[in-house]
């Protein structure tokens, strides 16, 4: 009589059968089975992940094909845990997170530390790298402290106030040293010969830094390009800024200046005295000039663009103050939305003007006396000579935006500081007036007479030396280079502190921080013992395209003012130069005018 198996034996038998079932599905082909086999893989790219069933088929040998039931079981394995979208998403997220962590570590720590070791090995000294922020916090703290202390009236020792952090670094670490903007090292170059070598870029190794994304809403076009695109745009733009073409714009300069002078006269009291902030006045003047010289008959639309660009610059500056907050630019806040709205409106207006002008020029109807007409004409000529070398409409929009950024802000600051300094130094104001009256009397200034204004030119150059609109120039390198006998690794940036170079006594003499236009009596090239140490318009192939335009506009404005008024600083004026994109008077520029 057969004995009934015990419960223990039943369980043991069931366990053995289950183990055999698993063995039959073994991935190792030990039994040569043609059945579906699976294995549990708990790693993806070396990361632990939820179990994922892998399905494999081995060639059928002795056994028959799987039954329908077995097929359904295999399919259920595949469609169940293996194909779960949550499991796959988890694995993908883990891989992405690991990659992001590795990239961040490389960007924020390994690369900066490697570059720091390489620079110190070459004998350079500088600040120690701080994770993520570098010297940004210390630079900001010192700038805020300096901004709280105005300068004595008449002092031109502005470097410690405008760039206090750099002054401290140079004192502590020497003339050739480095600092950190976030995780990027910047080597400070104050030697004029090395600065010229970088700016001339004969080796082709020094490139402009990539413009930050948000900055492109204000500054774009040729100044932001490199390589072939830069060369193409420069080639197309050059004809528009030839001296003869600019000379034809002189009547526009005169008309805009006359309108400003008339407005000033109308603001006079019965005693013939008026007080106004000339910075605001010169911003309106240069905006008027660029609107008319750039767009001619489309002046009203051009003026609207100027107003929008003004608002855009203020909003972008506001956004820059929080740009280090990750994702700030993508927040749906009012300032960010308005920046995009302004950009769209500017582009819409410019696109309409450009398309209309392009059509007119092609039909022989358009005027080429304004910058846009000259640009369209040059672009068409380049396109006809060789296919696909002209600018697109989007490219031309960027260049038109640049007309405002470069042609308005910098010239208005040059004129503002000129009136401030001539108010501080009335003896030079009187010399300039005598020269203007000698050449023109009360008649309208013309091009030939303006080109002979030696004292006025000396004054403008001295103002640009002491108060350059742009206080830093920067370049970067994308491969290892040698400069001044020192090898710099790829990824090092160079900063040329123009303001500091312009105030260096070893270059300009012991009166470097004094207002002395006489130093330019024989021109810029002979103002120092160096070939040149004057970088207000940059240097080399990327020298400012609008240099002649800006100087002629400034001469016309100054000549008409000197013919009509004497001026002095208002008692409310506070001498506090500081940098907000350009070098500006922190508390404005109130000037008292007296009608002559």
Image (cartoon, helix red, strand yellow):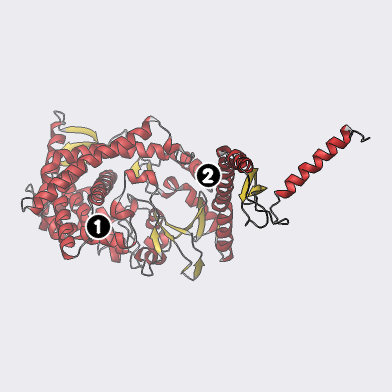
Q: Residue furthest top?
A: 270
How far across and how far down the image is residue 472, in percent?
A: 39, 53
Apparent side of residue 407 relative to residue 243 in the rendered image (left or right): right
User: Dot 1 lies on which element?
Assistant: loop
Contact, mark 1 vs mark 2 (Cβ under 8 Å): no
Residue 337's place in the image compared with 431, above or below, is above
**Residue 566 visible in the snapshot:** no
Q: Which residue position is annotated with label 2? A: 138
**Residue 575 visible in the snapshot:** yes
Residue 385's place in the image compared with 360, above or below, is below
Quarter placement of the N terminus: top right
How far across and how far down the image is residue 288, in percent?
A: 18, 41
Q: Residue furthest right?
A: 1
- Which residue: 26% across, 61% down? 232
- Which residue: 49% across, 43% down? 142
Apparent side of residue 170 relative to residue 255 in the rendered image (left or right): right
Q: Looking at the rendered structure, which numbered label has been put on residue 545? A: 1
Apparent side of residue 25 relative to residue 338 in the rendered image (left or right): right
Q: Residue furthest bottom?
A: 485
How far across and how far down the image is residue 56, in percent?
A: 62, 51
How far, Cα to Cα, is label 1 from label 2? 35 Å
> Are there few (<14), some (14-19), or many (20+) residues within 10 Å of tag 2?
few
Of labels 1 and 2, the one closer to you: 1
Q: Quadrant of residue 594?
A: top left
Q: Quadrant of residue 575?
A: top left
Q: Quadrant of residue 551?
A: bottom left
**Of 213 and 82, which appears nearest the observer?**
82
């Amino acid at each position: 009589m057969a004995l009934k198996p015990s419960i223990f034996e039943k369980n043991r038998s069931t366990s053995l059968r289950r183990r055999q079932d698993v063995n039959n599905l073994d991935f190792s082909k030990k039994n040569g089975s043609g059945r579906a086999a699976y294995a549990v893989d708990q790693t993806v790219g070396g990361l632990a992940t939820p179990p994922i069933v892998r399905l494999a088929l081995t060639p059928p040998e002795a056994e028959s094909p799987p039954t329908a039931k077995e097929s359904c079981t295999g399919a259920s394995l595949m469609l169940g845990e293996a194909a779960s979208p949550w499991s796959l998403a988890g694995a993908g997220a883990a891989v992405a997170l690991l990659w992001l962590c590795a990239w961040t570590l490389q960007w924020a720590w390994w690369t900066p530390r490697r570059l720091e070791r390489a620079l110190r090995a070459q004998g350079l000294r500088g600040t120690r790298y701080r994770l993520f922020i570098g010297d940004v916090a210390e630079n900001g703290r010192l700038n805020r402290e300096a901004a709280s202390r105005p300068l004595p009236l008449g002092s031109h020792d502005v470097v410690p106030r405008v760039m206090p952090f750099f002054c401290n670094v140079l004192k502590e670490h020497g003339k050739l040293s480095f600092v950190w903007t976030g995780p990027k090292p910047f080597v400070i170059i104050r030697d004029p010969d090395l600065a010229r070598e970088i700016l001339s870029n004969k080796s082709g190794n020094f490139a402009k830094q990539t413009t930050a994304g948000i900055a492109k809403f204000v500054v774009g076009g040729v100044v932001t390009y490199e390589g072939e695109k830069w060369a193409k745009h420069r080639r197309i733009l050059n004809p528009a800024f030839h001296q003869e073409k600019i000379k034809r714009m002189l009547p526009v300069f005169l008309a805009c200046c006359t309108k400003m002078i008339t407005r000033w006269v109308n603001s006079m009291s019965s005693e013939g005295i008026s007080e106004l902030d000339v910075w605001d006045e010169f911003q309106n003047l240069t905006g008027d000039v660029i609107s008319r010289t750039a767009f001619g008959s489309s002046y009203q639309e051009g003026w609207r663009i100027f107003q929008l660009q003004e608002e855009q610059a203020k909003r972008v500056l506001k956004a820059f103050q929080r740009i280090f907050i990750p994702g700030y630019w993508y927040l749906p806040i009012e300032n960010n939305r308005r920046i995009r709205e302004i950009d769209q409106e500017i582009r819409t207006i410019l696109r309409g003007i450009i398309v209309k002008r392009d059509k007119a020029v092609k039909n022989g109807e358009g005027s080429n006396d304004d910058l846009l007409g000259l640009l369209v004409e040059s672009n068409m000529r380049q396109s006809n000579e060789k296919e696909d070398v002209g600018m697109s409409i989007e490219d031309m929009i960027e260049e038109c935006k640049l007309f405002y950024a470069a042609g308005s802000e910098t010239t208005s600051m040059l004129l503002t500081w000129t009136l401030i300094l001539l108010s501080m130094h009335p003896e030079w104001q009187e010399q300039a007036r005598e020269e203007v009256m000698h050449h023109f009397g009360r008649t309208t200034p013309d091009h030939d007479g303006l080109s002979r204004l030696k004292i006025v030119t000396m004054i403008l150059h001295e103002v640009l030396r002491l108060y350059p609109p742009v206080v830093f120039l920067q370049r970067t390198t994308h491969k290892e280079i040698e400069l001044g006998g020192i090898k710099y690794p790829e990824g090092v940036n160079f900063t040329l502190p123009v303001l500091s170079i312009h105030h260096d006594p070893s270059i300009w003499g012991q009166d470097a921080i004094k207002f002395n236009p006489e130093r330019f009596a024989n021109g810029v090239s002979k103002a120092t013992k160096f070939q040149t140490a004057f970088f207000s318009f940059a240097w080399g192939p990327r020298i400012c395209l609008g240099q002649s335009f800006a100087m002629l506009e400034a001469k016309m404005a100054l000549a008409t003012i000197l013919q009509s008024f004497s001026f002095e600083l208002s008692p409310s004026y506070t001498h506090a130069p500081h940098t907000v994109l350009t070098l500006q008077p922190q508390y404005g520029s109130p000037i008292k005018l007296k009608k002559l």
